[in-house]
Image: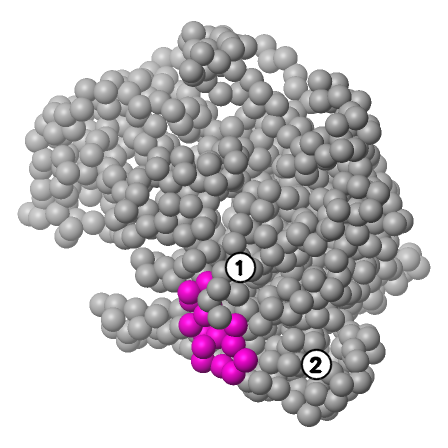
Amino acid sequence: MYKYDEVFKASIEYFNGDELAASVFAGKYALQDTEGNYLELTPDDMHQRLASEFAGIEAQYDNSMHYEEIYDLFKDFKYVIPQGSPMSGIGNEAKIQSLSNCFVIESPADSYAGILKTDQEQVQIMKRRGGVGFDISTIRPKGMTTSNAAKTTDGIEVFLDRFSNSCREVAQGGRRGALMLSISVHHPQVMEFIKIKKDLTRVTGANISVRVTDEFMKAVKADDHYTVRWPVDSDSPEVHDHFKATEVWDALIEGAHASAEPGVLFWDTATRMTPSDAYTDVGFGSVSTNPCGEIILSPYDSCRLMLVNLTSFVKNPWSNGAEFDYGLFRSITKKAQRLMDDMIDLEIEQIDKILAKIDNDPENDEVKYYERNLWNTIRQVAINGRRTGLGITGLGDAIAMLGQRYGSDESIKTTEEIYKWLSLASYEESIQLAKERGAFEVFDHHKERDHPFLQRIFSELTPEVIEDYRTYGRRNIANTTTAPAGSVSCLTQTTSGIEPAFMLHYTRRKKVQNGEEVMFVDDLGDEWTEFTVYHHGFKQWLDSDHGTTASESDLAHAVAFSPYHGATANEINWRAKVKLQSVAQKWICHAISNTTNLPADIDVETVKDIYMLGWELGCKGVTVYRDGSRSGVLVATDDKKEATPAIIERNAPKRPEELECDIYHTSIKGQKWVVLIGLLNGKPYEVIGGEADQIEIPSRYRSGKLYKRIFKTLNSKYDLTVGNGDDELILKDVVSVFDNPNHAGYTRVISTSLRHGVPVQYLFEQMQKDKEMDMFSFSKVIARCLKNYIDDGTSASDKICSDCGAIDSLVYQEGCVTCKSCGAGKCG
């Protein structure tokens, strides 16, 4: 067993001094037991764990790969990386979770019972670490009659808030829920859907996207009207109207320009070119997408993700003789597809554990009915389709290693070639697996006849492979995608997914130690040093024969001389970025998580052109991010403004004799804590806290992790009353029970700040900044509890990471926010 500090230190050595990569591994993927003790010291331990689990599945089949071969694929993140949930969940006995990164569930039935069923299903999946998407086009529009007491429906808006709030509930205590809500452009309330997030207090827990059809896009081009109806897929709808297409289009694009939402899904392209849609009549018709948009799924289907690291296939990198080894790439991709199929068996084992836990839970069968039914359905769909999500990462670096500029015509051709080989190798292996293991349960040659995407693939395969396909079928209903790779790219030390390098170098600050040069002294007198952090690929180029001709002391000159010049996220021509996405999409089963970054002063008409080009070139969706457009998400570091401090008179309200009180039990790195937050008018007024073994609240008074406010009070002498009437418990002199004077002094300062009106979000941000302070664990515990009282559940600062407190560290790529300091990621 190890402590966090031991894992972090050993991982820094493993990653050659890369503290960010070490932090991501230690914080997200290193195996821990139920007490928070670390069971893995470095990523090599994790790779041995993964190889052992995959080898166990392989042993059940003929022509199996052995442990050593699988380990070599994972070792040093060189070739194949199981992504996210699989990396943390495979072989993890301490957590009962799904290995699927994302799910789509059935659209809610148009009734309260149906809506509540959907609400429960999303929560049940999120608590097992899965992101969820579903379409709400089935909900009747506002004003239609109902047979309940209300007589008419309020429409979609109230239910958007419901689903969003449920997602945020799951996100409490450090867990992040992830939710995508979509709607058809033909729904009569599409305009309300598009505009709902203009109110910054609404639908804060979900991403939203509009499914647009070819009918709609043609009407936009023709400046014509199109039909809205409900039900949206009915030939004889109950509601029927005509909207001006350009008015809806303008609202969509203005939203994307203002805040990158709603997203736009080109739905006819998606359903036409996704191979699983050939099986719509047996339940595999696409209905929505996952929160980051890379997986278009049918109801109750899910997808596990795995990446191939493209940088490992460039021979003679950074030289005139650089070339991409397509032969090795094909061989590794086929092995990766085999492992992807194994991951479905590993997922089924995990679902069986989930079902066993449900059976053993103390609730009665009526309470457990929907959860059990949900996971049984997901299990069967996984067996019937055996869907996989094989993708790539490191494209931006691979392009540079080949001496090409990302976004150039040459790089676009290279990108298409790489994706073509990925897809063909994946399908070759899926056909071979069908020969060895059998086709997916619902496979039917007749359904696949004339499917445009499959015909494109089959036209490139050899006659021998096609003959095997005709005889044995395919093992997997759909194979490939390109998902966000934010935290994983920190481990591979490459660019993320299909994206270019975001920045080539930035300045990082840390406290002075061991005689380092003092470069900055803050207001508290603490001394700091600064150093330049280089993008790994750029540093490799600097160290190469070509790079040594550039001057590292003159970074502007070095950048201009490098293959990354003019090719970072904010420099690439938007038209080139969309073209590059489209050639990749041509060969991908599902979709591609990709962001077209735009300067702050880009006009709305240009954004319209980007989306129109994406549709015309066959993309399944387009995401743009205009610099500075997402208030509360991130702002570029070169847009700093001098702030003039305001002098505000503040008077603390007098403490009442009794305060309502919330009581939290939480833990950091295995250390358990109890925190009491006194409330005045529903807002935090004072904080008391300490180690959990210093105070015990009988379990009969608990209601989950958060106690019911109505039954708790702190009196002015700091006695705690829990319960009500005859069942009342009084704990005398609570403060003295928490006997650590450092904790007491710290919480008194926080309480004073709260009483004098300092916004909770600012305290929250400050408490997480200094990881080196002695009381950082306690500080983080208090911050975690106070986060529940921030209105929108997020940090108020545009530039501060809510996980690590790093300033100016957030970037927006692949539809997600990623912290370049700690690797934390959040979709939307």
> In terms of depth relative to the viewer, which is nearer, 273 or 262?
273
Q: Residue at x 61, y 23 (%)?
A: 532
Measured as percent of width and height from the top left, residue 325 is found at: 75, 58
Q: Which residues are magenta?
A: 51-65
> In terms of depth relative to the viewer, which is nearer, 191 or 320?
320
Q: Which disc is residue 254 wearing?
A: none
Q: Residue at x 66, y 44 (%)?
A: 495
Q: Identify the residue at the far right of this view.
A: 222
- Whether residue 631 is visible to the viewer of this picture, yes or no, is no
Measured as percent of width and height from the top left, residue 263 is found at: 69, 52
Q: Which residue is mark 2?
A: 278
Q: Residue at x 58, y 72 (%)?
A: 338
Residue type at mark 2 is: Ala
Mark 2: secondary structure: helix
Q: Is residue 55 magenta?
A: yes
Measured as percent of width and height from the top left, residue 767 is found at: 39, 26
In the image, taking residue 319 as reference, residue 809 lies left or right, namely left
In the image, taking residue 823 as reference, residue 777 lies left or right, namely left
- Whether residue 173 is visible to the viewer of this picture, yes or no, is yes
Considering only vertical position in the picture, is 317 above or below 482?
Answer: above
Q: Which residue is mark 1?
A: 72
Considering only vertical position in the picture, is 767 above or below 402?
Answer: above
